[in-house]
Image (cartoon, rainbow, N blue to C red):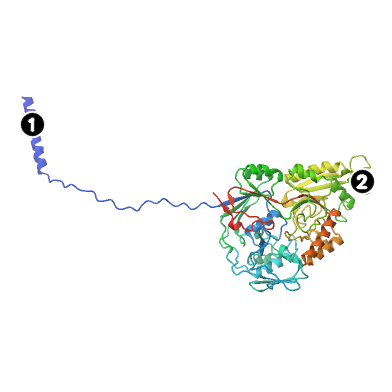
Amino acid sequence: MKQSRFFILMAGMVVIALLLAACRPTATPTTPPPAATQPPTVAPTQPPARKVATFIWTQEFDTLNPLYTNMWFSAITQQIWNCWAWDYDDQNNPRPVLVKEMPSEANGGISPDGRVITLKLRDDIVWSDGKPITSDDFVFTYEMVMSPKNTVASTFPYDKLEKVEAPDARTVVMTFKEPFAAWQATLWHGLLPAHILRPVFEKEGTIDTAEWNRAPTVGCGPFVFKEWESGSFARFVANEKYWLGRPKIDEIFIRFVPDDASQVAALKAGDGDLGTFIAYSDIPTLEEANVQMVKVFSGYNEGWYFYLHPEKGHPALLDVRVRQAIALAFDRFSICKDLLLGLTQPAITQWDNTPWEDPTLEPWPYDPERAKQLLDEAGWKDTNGDGVRDKDGVELVLTLGTTTRQIRRDVQAVAQQQLAQVGIKLELANADSDIFFGSYGEGGPCATGQYDIFEYSTVVSFPDPETADWLCSQIPSDENPAGVNWQAVCDEELDALFQLQATQVDPNERMQTFHKISRLIYEKVYWLGVWEDPDIWAIGPRLKNVRLSGATPFFNIVEWELSQ
């Protein structure tokens, strides 16, 4: 009975549920509304990667003001952010930069007597801050070079000028005291912004300590100074206002390394795109690493200078026979063969491989026996048996100074051994480049006579042969701290020849004068060539469209490309 009641109860509940369901309203099926139309998804655009070329320098520049340096690394760096009135292409032909055309007699830019040269400036030239570059900037630059309140590296060649005038904003008139043959190769290598530095000069009385000298945030080159971290790096970014076109590379990052080995390691590893001042011994290693090696003749020759001040110089060096003996006792042929892998040869003159050297000259031969004879004739003999020659109580002990570059240290060591064989003792000294190349006013060891012999590679006013290094008027002193005749040579015949060539506008006449100059320096051994030293550039595989000039290496840096 219990079971029958259960089923009856359950059946009743089902009937009730069905009746209730029947009484509910019928649900109307609904269709979800169409989704709103969404715009297509676009991946965010990434800005193009900045093109940063890394240059590896083995010497840190001493300053960025073009008036205050003799250092090569400073000079070539200035071509990145500063501007020359004209530069030189890879054939060493002048190329107008700030001027509309190169002055000539034909276009009226050079007066018939050669004393007045007129520059016509381009209309579109501007400083990186947008201020126009005008003739006033040229006049101001000239005034800063010549002002005795500024301790510039040299007043040459601006001291050849009688005056510089600006008759209007786009015209510069230079009047020389007498015709100056080398004006094109020596003038307007860098310009000062008058609107930046004139207030400094008026306030301080000098620009020696101007902040701009180390942080020239206003320039006129293809790139603009951004940052200089001393001992580490310097940065230059593309100049958006450069009138010859914005560079294709966004930034030049210059990294300073302590030595040749560090430079080679960076280039091999791909951490650098450009290097220079490459030692000959490193060329095979870099070529194996797919680094392109380019040799560019720039007039540089490595050589020895002798400090010949008549009162302060070593008495032995004041005798030409001793200098000739040194030339004969120093085997520069073995230096070139063994240390430089036979890739160069001893330099004869400062004008090797140019029409300006006397073609009849040959390198001093290696002849230690003849060297001993000359030393004997000059009265320098070893009287006390210590292996070092002496005279009148003075030992023939000389200080040979140079930079800390390894190849130069190696040369020092070899020279020390070779000269010891003829009774000359060399004491070796080295200094960092920023100290070594310091001017007299800066206490530089070469300029102040701290070395008896000093070695480095220098250039005259390439592609012109002009140099002030041998003029008597350029011997540095307290009264003339900007003098560049660091060897203190004052030879009246040589001085007269240099004064003559400077005024000779006939190329053939001038060439004959330079043949006399090169022979005189050679025979009197005022300078002893060690090796011919063209620029050796290392170009990494990322860097494209590079053309290099011996006079202005970065003349086409606007066109350089960098592959990623």
Q: Residues within 10 Å of mark 2 (few under 14, many from 20)?
A: some
Q: Nearer the viewer, residue 491 or 348?
A: 348
Q: Nearer the viewer, residue 535 or 423?
A: 535
N-term-proximal mark, 2 vs 1: 1
Query: With 365 as the anchor, is 205 left or right in this view?
Result: left
* Secondary structure state at the residue bearing disc 1: helix
- In what quadrant of the picture does the N terminus appear? top left
Where residue 155 appears, as percent x and y from the top left, is 75, 63
Instruction: Name the residue located 63 percent from the left edge and 57 percent from the top edge.
Output: 80
**For residue 170, which quarter of the picture?**
bottom right
Question: What residue is shown with label 2?
Answer: 373
Q: Which mark is on residue 114?
A: none
How many numbered circles are shown?
2
Q: Nearer the viewer, residue 394 or 411?
A: 411
Instruction: Name the residue located 80 percent from the left edge and 46 percent from the top edge.
Output: 332
Question: What residue is shown with label 1?
Answer: 9
Q: Amino acid at mark 1?
A: Leu
Q: Residues within 10 Å of mark 1 (few under 14, many from 20)?
A: few
**For residue 91, which quarter of the picture?**
bottom right
